[in-house]
Amino acid sequence: MHVILLGPPGAGTGTQGTILAQRLGVPKITTGDLLRDAIQKDNLLGRDAKRFMDRGELVPDKIILSLIKQQLVSPEAAKGIVMDSFPRTVRQAEAVNVMLMEQGERLKRVLLLDVPEEELVRRLLSRSAAEGRGDDTSELIQRRLHAYRESTAPLVGYYREMGILTIVSGTGTEEEITKRIEEVLGT
Ligand code: ADP
């Protein structure tokens, strides 16, 4: 089952994506983690991406697509994939469709985790205190939310038109949200 968890920064797609991937027994693709990994390794791609991440901007599609191509077509991904924090632009979404089609697969469902903006900011600031992630400062949070509104929010209409979008409330306890997701997917 190929599923996308879509949502603004702080919506909880990472947490719920991990739970869902485990439950389905499929890999999870998280471009944010892959990018932080590349930065840690200090390879060329990581150095390229860091400039954008440090400014709270999206990393260009070309870099993201080269990063995920391998993962999308890996044998482990044949049974399905949970994607979180990816795709984030219409161009990335189109690339996913093409890559899946080439393997005779298609997206089963896109779940939009809906969380009010003041709750997002609250969560991101408390994560900043807990994990010390460099891009969780007040200014960068605003920039990331702006990038979401500009570039990622259009995916809502894109997937709605494909007829595979479901909006799920992303507030409540972790267990409550997991349950809502499972109900939508019938798992
Ligand atoms: P958050 O959702 O909290 O912003 P992520 O770990 O998903 O955290 O992303 C951190 C940063 O990595 C983003 O601000 C962006 O710069 C970059 N990034 C991650 N995934 C993508 C993507 N699919 N396309 C473009 N940039 C991305």
Image (cartoon, grey):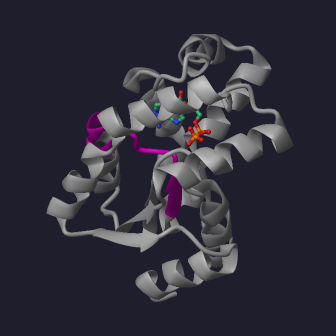
The segment highlighted magenta reads 81-94
Residue 125 lies in the magenta stretch: no
Q: Quarter of the image for the N terminus: give it.
A: bottom left
Q: Give percent across and percent down for residue 97.
A: 28, 50
Q: Regarding ligand 1, which quadrant of the image does it lie in?
A: top right
> For this rendering, which residue is in front, 139 or 30?
139
Residue at the location (62% across, 55% down)?
A: 14
Relative to 16, 37 lies left or right: right
Q: Give percent across and percent down for residue 96.
A: 34, 47
> For this rendering, which residue is in front, 91 or 115?
115
Residue 114 visible, this orientation: yes
Image position of 135 with respect to 97: above or below: above
Instruction: Identify the image quadrant of residue 93.
Output: top left
Relative to 70, 172 lies left or right: right
Residue 74 visible, this orientation: no
Number of numbered callouts drawn:
0
Residue at the location (70% across, 41% down)?
A: 125
> For this rendering, which residue is in front, 21 or 127?
127
Relative to 173, 182 lies left or right: left
Q: Please identify the residue farthest to the front as the structure is shown.
A: 118
Residue at the location (61% across, 74% down)?
A: 172
Instruction: Identify the image quadrant of residue 100.
Output: bottom left
Q: Give percent across and percent down for residue 25.
A: 64, 72
> For this rendering, which residue is in front, 22 or 168?
168
Image position of 93 with respect to 177: above or below: above
Q: Give percent across and percent down for residue 13.
A: 56, 57
Residue 83 lies in the magenta stretch: yes
Residue at the location (50% across, 38% down)?
A: 68
Instruction: Identify the image quadrant of residue 18.
Output: bottom right
